[in-house]
Image (cartoon, rainbow, N blue to C red):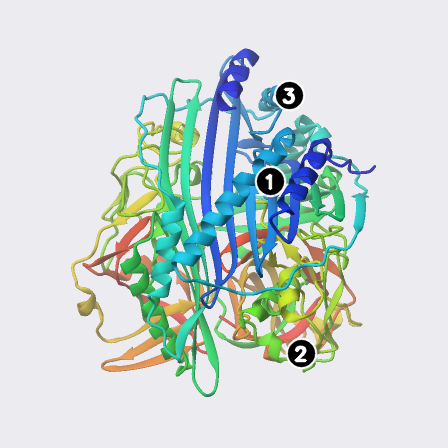
């Protein structure tokens, strides 16, 4: 079925077009992004349940972007009466002028930026989904999650609780200018199992998930996620600490994705080039990884939770080859950064929601698969670890440092898994060294979309990353 | 709109309800160097509604929550409320009670224009040089008003300011350039403190240019003297969160010491009603409970759990609240007395994290000072790690205290036996 576009947005579109026409009398460029995204978040554990209509991306609101004298200004609001659109013009102009007065009083200069093009474009996309969150039988879903949670705690007396989370969001966004009218509607869903357990007085946890740009039908597959989460918990509970040092590593597709995201994804967000905050700007055309490393980024790369039709500035979705056989080719770019750098936007201008500014952000960041099997890769390791289970990561585009906290490392000695597990594992290093050390990639190709990504320590958006199993060398602690 | 929603809730005949209506007026400025990249205004209202339904003769209480847009039509609002009442019956939680005690609101409205202007002027006062300067900064100045209404008779409004400044600084020499990242949150703009903090960060930047690789110290004494130490105290606070306790994520018990064989200082932490210029100084929490000063941990012994009404009810702790400000007590030694022997003082991590369940700490070192007697060497690379449940047996806290927005903690926290991986 098609994910039907918002009736509310269709209803307010004429009023917003009136608003744009009025504002164009005062400004050289005007756009409006309007959103009406609904969804649910259902959580079931042994001790407590909850049902909420909010997810990270549910929202209803609007943001106006205007341009004059080299400056872009924005006004975010969620009380809009389409019948009184023209009355709003004075309010918008008044408050933005008041801001300019403060800038003048503080003698602040403007970072001069060219005007965005506004070529005629129309797009109406209703993507395919199996079902809609707003039509889901939540009673049946709660029962389903309860069954999964019960199965989880039944796996061992050591399991304290098994939290099952199902969330699904129907995104509707409309981007309007004098010449553009873009409307998109799609559904994405995420299921997650968070298990907590204790052994010998020590507690630990594990997390596993599924995601797709599909409807709540994906939750039928959460039984496997429960088993996967338990495997992780059971292995973590008996784990030792790793002896710090440099090791051969094999990363699962989830950890490969974490490396893609933290090591290079943030480093080629080109709004960071504008601020001279990314070392990547100096390495375009140069080697940053081994021949095995090819990395794609874009909403069109794979189908997962961030596979939209256009970004929050009305730029169509893209698929950019950032690294080709180890050579850094290009980065990704929002529309304003593109104007400042004299390049083209890539469809990566994203907002946390209508209240937030656009930044260059990742969508799907994926390593290309290789030709090896996972078994061949393990067999090739003299002493090292198979790393699995993502905890967190942190970018460092200016210096290309990398920090990834991985849930578990499975020891490999002389080509065989020994059964010994270490946890948690802090993987650190210098990005070109890490990517340069990649010597094997498997034929697998998985995306993971359960996480959210911040820029610095804020601006949370959905992102996806993944790829194959990779073999490399890294410092573990 | 809120009053209309309350009428609709009553007309629907729901068993209980909560409505929170938060209005935010915000000014934002984004600078590259000191040139304005973009200016923004936010003028928004968010109305969140929770509907409760008694199940099985009141043995259980179901609930469901959703935001109702201020632009929602009456029909739309009615449908959402009806859906919430329907959904609430699927959420079979043990019975609990909402807050009932009458409370007074308060606070004053602040002008985000003046707050934002103060931040711009503060940033213009940073003493930059050709070697250390500001790369970029973002200013967020908010004035918030929040009304909370529930079916038990509470109808209270609080107002408070909230601000954030994100700053990136650079330092450079002939060979290379580095950056440091900071994010400061507060109520309004404290110009003097902001200038002082960012100036200190600039000096860290200068030192980062001359670092050598962090030595592999194996187990070392680590002195935390920056905002990263807040994460350690947050771990204590979360272990005393009612939801954490009820869900089995915390095994701490009221009246029972959290560890034995303590060789260093013990921890005493209070939830407090106010801290100077905190970004959440309000007399009432988000569920209408009165906020007051209350020990949560006294000399390593849990005193009071805090958190949501639901989980407090389950734990039998009705007289508590959702704490926002925390104040820890200092130890017996001064910071200068703690600065003795060999120790590593990390002042910049990629990200310093404390796992709230396991207490595992981890952080990649971007800048630390390795103190060997009088010799101090700036180092970078490698990481610190360990588990707080073990480490807290041997911790020394400085007498002096320092506030980081909503948290007041000892200015120096000295921990023995932390694993330090070399670069």
Residue A361: quarter of image? bottom right
Q: Is residue B400 above or below residue B422?
A: above
- The numbered mark 3 sits on a residue in which chain? B
Number of callouts: 3
Q: Is residue A419 visible?
A: no
Q: Secondary structure at mark 1?
A: loop
Q: Residues within 10 Å of mark 1 (few under 14, many from 20)?
A: some
Circle number at residue A11: none
Question: Gap between marks 2 and 3, in whole Å?
Answer: 54 Å
Tell which of A328 and B173 is nearer to you.
B173
The residue carrying mark 1 is A55
User: Residue A269's spot in the image, x, y percent?
Assistant: 62, 66
The residue carrying mark 3 is B79
Q: Left of B113 or right of it: where is A247?
A: right
Q: Secondary structure at mark 2?
A: loop
Specify whether disc 2 shares its chain with disc 3.
no
- Mark 1 vs 2: CB contact within 8 A: no
- The numbered mark 2 sits on a residue in which chain? A
Q: Is residue B159 visible?
A: yes
The residue carrying mark 2 is A284
Q: Is residue B129 above or below residue B313?
A: below
Specify whether disc 3 shares its chain with disc 1.
no
Q: Left of B371 or right of it: where is A216?
A: right
């Amino acid at each position: 079925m098609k994910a039907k576009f918002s009736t509310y947005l269709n209803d307010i579109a004429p009023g917003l077009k009136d608003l744009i026409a009025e504002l164009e009398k005062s400004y050289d460029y005007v756009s409006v992004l309007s959103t009406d995204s609904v969804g649910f978040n259902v959580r079931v554990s042994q001790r407590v349940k909850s049902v909420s209509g909010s997810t990270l991306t549910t929202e209803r609101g609007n943001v106006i972007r205007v341009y004059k004298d080299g400056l872009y200004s924005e006004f975010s609001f969620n009380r809009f009466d389409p019948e009184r659109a023209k009355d709003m013009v004075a309010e918008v102009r008044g408050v933005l002028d008041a801001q300019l007065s403060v800038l003048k009083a503080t003698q602040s200069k403007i970072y001069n930026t060219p005007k965005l093009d506004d070529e005629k474009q129309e797009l109406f996309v209703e993507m395919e989904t199996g079902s809609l969150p707003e039509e889901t039988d939540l009673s049946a879903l709660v029962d389903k999650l309860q069954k999964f949670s019960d199965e989880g705690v039944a796996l061992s007396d050591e399991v304290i609780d098994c939290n099952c989370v199902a969330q699904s969001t129907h995104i509707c966004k409309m981007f309007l200018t004098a010449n553009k009218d873009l409307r998109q509607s799609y559904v994405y869903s995420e299921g997650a199992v968070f298990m907590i357990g204790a052994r010998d007085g020590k507690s630990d946890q594990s997390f596993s998930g599924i995601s797709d740009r599909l409807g709540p039908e994906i939750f039928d597959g959460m039984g496997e996620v429960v088993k996967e989460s338990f495997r992780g918990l059971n292995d973590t509970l008996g784990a030792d600490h790793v002896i710090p040092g440099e090791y051969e590593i094999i990363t699962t597709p989830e950890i490969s994705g974490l490396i893609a995201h933290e090591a290079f994804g943030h480093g080629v967000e080109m709004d960071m080039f504008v601020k001279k905050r990314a070392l990547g700007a100096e390495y375009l055309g140069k080697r940053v990884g081994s021949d095995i490393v090819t990395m794609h980024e874009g909403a069109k790369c794979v189908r997962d939770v961030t596979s939209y039709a256009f970004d929050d500035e009305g730029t169509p979705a893209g698929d950019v080859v950032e690294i080709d056989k180890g050579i850094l080719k290009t980065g990704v770019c929002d529309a304003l950064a593109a104007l400042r750098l004299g390049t083209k936007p890539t469809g990566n201008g994203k907002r946390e929601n209508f209240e937030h500014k656009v930044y260059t952000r990742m969508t799907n960041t994926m390593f290309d698969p290789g030709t090896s099997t996972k078994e061949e890769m393990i067999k090739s390791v003299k002493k090292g670890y198979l790393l699995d289970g993502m905890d967190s990561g942190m970018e460092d585009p200016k210096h290309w440092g990398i920090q990834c906290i991985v849930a578990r490392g499975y020891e490999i000695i002389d080509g065989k898994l020994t059964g010994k597990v270490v946890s948690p594992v802090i993987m650190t290093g210098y990005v070109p060294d890490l990517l340069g050390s990649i010597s094997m990639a498997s034929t697998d190709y998985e995306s993971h979309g359960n996480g959210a990504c911040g820029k610095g320590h804020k601006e949370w958006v959905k992102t996806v990353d993944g790829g194959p199993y990779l073999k490399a060398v890294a410092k573990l602690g | 709109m809120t009053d209309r929603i309350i009428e609709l809730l009553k007309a629907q005949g729901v068993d209980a309800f909560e409505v929170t209506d938060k209005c935010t007026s915000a000014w934002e400025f984004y600078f590259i160097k000191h040139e304005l990249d973009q200016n923004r205004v936010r003028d928004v209202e968010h109305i969140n509604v929770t509907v409760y339904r008694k199940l099985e003769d009141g043995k259980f209480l179901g609930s469901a929550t959703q935001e109702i847009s201020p632009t929602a039509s009456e029909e739309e609002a009615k449908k959402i409320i009806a859906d919430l009442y329907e959904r609430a019956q699927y959420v079979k939680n043990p019975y609990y009670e909402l807050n009932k005690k009458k409370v007074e609101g308060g606070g004053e409205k602040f002008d985000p224009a003046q707050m934002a202007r103060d931040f711009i002027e503060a940033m213009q006062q940073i003493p930059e040089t050709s070697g250390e300067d500001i790369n970029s900064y973002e200013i967020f100045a908010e004035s918030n008003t929040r009304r909370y209404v529930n079916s038990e008779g509470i109808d209270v409004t609080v107002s408070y300011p909230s601000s954030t400044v994100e700053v990136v600084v650079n330092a450079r020499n002939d060979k290379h350039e580095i950056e440091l990242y900071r994010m400061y949150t507060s109520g309004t703009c404290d110009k003097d403190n902001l200038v002082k903090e960012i100036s200190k960060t600039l000096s860290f930047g200068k030192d980062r240019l001359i670092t050598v690789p962090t030595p592999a110290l194996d187990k070392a004494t680590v002195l935390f003297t920056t905002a990263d130490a807040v994460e350690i105290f947050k771990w204590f606070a979360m272990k005393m969160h009612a939801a954490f306790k009820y869900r089995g994520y915390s095994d701490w018990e009221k009246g029972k010491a959290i560890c034995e064989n303590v060789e260093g200082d013990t921890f005493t932490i209070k939830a407090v009603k106010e801290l100077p210029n905190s970004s959440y100084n309000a007399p009432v929490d988000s569920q209408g409970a009165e906020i007051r000063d209350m020990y949560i941990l006294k000399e390593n012994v849990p005193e009071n759990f805090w958190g949501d009404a639901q989980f407090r009810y389950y734990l039998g702790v009705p007289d508590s609240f959702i704490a926002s400000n925390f104040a820890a007590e200092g130890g017996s030694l001064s910071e200068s007395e703690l600065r003795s022997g060999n120790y590593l003082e990390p002042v910049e991590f990629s990200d310093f994290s404390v796992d709230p369940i396991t207490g595992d700490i981890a952080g990649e070192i971007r800048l630390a000072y390795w103190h060997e007697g009088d010799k101090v060497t700036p180092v970078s690379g490698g990481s610190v790690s360990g588990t707080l449940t073990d480490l807290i047996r041997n911790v020394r806290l400085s007498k002096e205290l320092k506030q980081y927005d909503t948290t007041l903690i000892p200015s120096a926290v000295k921990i023995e036996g932390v694993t330090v991986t070399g670069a």
